Image (cartoon, helix red, strand yellow):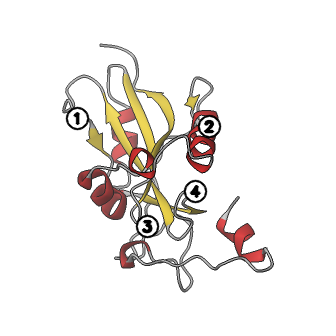
Amino acid sequence: MSASDLALLPGSATLHDHSPDLSYSGTMTAGQTGQSGQMRQGLLPVRRPADIDYRLARQTTVNAWRSGNLGTELVCDAQPMLRRNAVECGTPVMEACPICEEYRMAHVTYVFGPRLPSHGRCISTPGELARLDERRGDLSAYVVEVCTGCGWNHLVRITSMGRGLS
């Protein structure tokens, strides 16, 4: 359910943006961060037919947490660097966190492949993803959704990148 859907439900609590870094008040456009107002276009890979989507795994995890089969400490375990990257390099998502339902999330993209750090490269500037996609070699882009409030994080999808010529 999206944040706008939550606001339309009678008697539903309004979402609060406790984090000034991902503020959504005012006339912010999609893909713009709240802290600096910079546009965050070009930070998510284009969807391709060979993408691996993790929506079902995400929903299974959320359902297990809601039913009490998973503890909050197991689903809200984002590392400090991932949270920092969500604030500084993430693309804001107009969807409430499925766990705390107070904060809105951000998508963070990491690219892995030859001649990249073993921990991956966090995409932080527009055009960086396009430059990596033009490289020779097989690269993979991992899109992770992160809640900077409670620490929820889950893999959204994996996309193949690069020109495949090593």
Q: Please provide percent x and percent y for residue 87.
A: 34, 64
Mark 1 residue type? His
> Which residue does the numbered mark 4 point to in the structure image?
98
Q: Residue at x 29, y 13 (%)?
A: 166
Q: Residue at x 39, y 71 (%)?
A: 38
> Which residue does the numbered mark 2 point to in the structure image?
60
Q: For the image shown, how many numbered marks are present on the structure?
A: 4
* Callout in the foreground (2, 1): 2
Please say if 105 is above or below 119.
Answer: below
- Asked if the residues shown at circle 4 and circle 2 are in contact, with their CB atoms under 8 angstroms apart, the answer is no
Most extreme residue toward the top, as rendered? 166
Tag 1 secondary structure: loop
In the image: residue 80, left or right of residue 70: left
> Which residue does the numbered mark 1 point to in the structure image?
119
Mark 3 residue type? Met
> Which residue does the numbered mark 3 point to in the structure image?
39
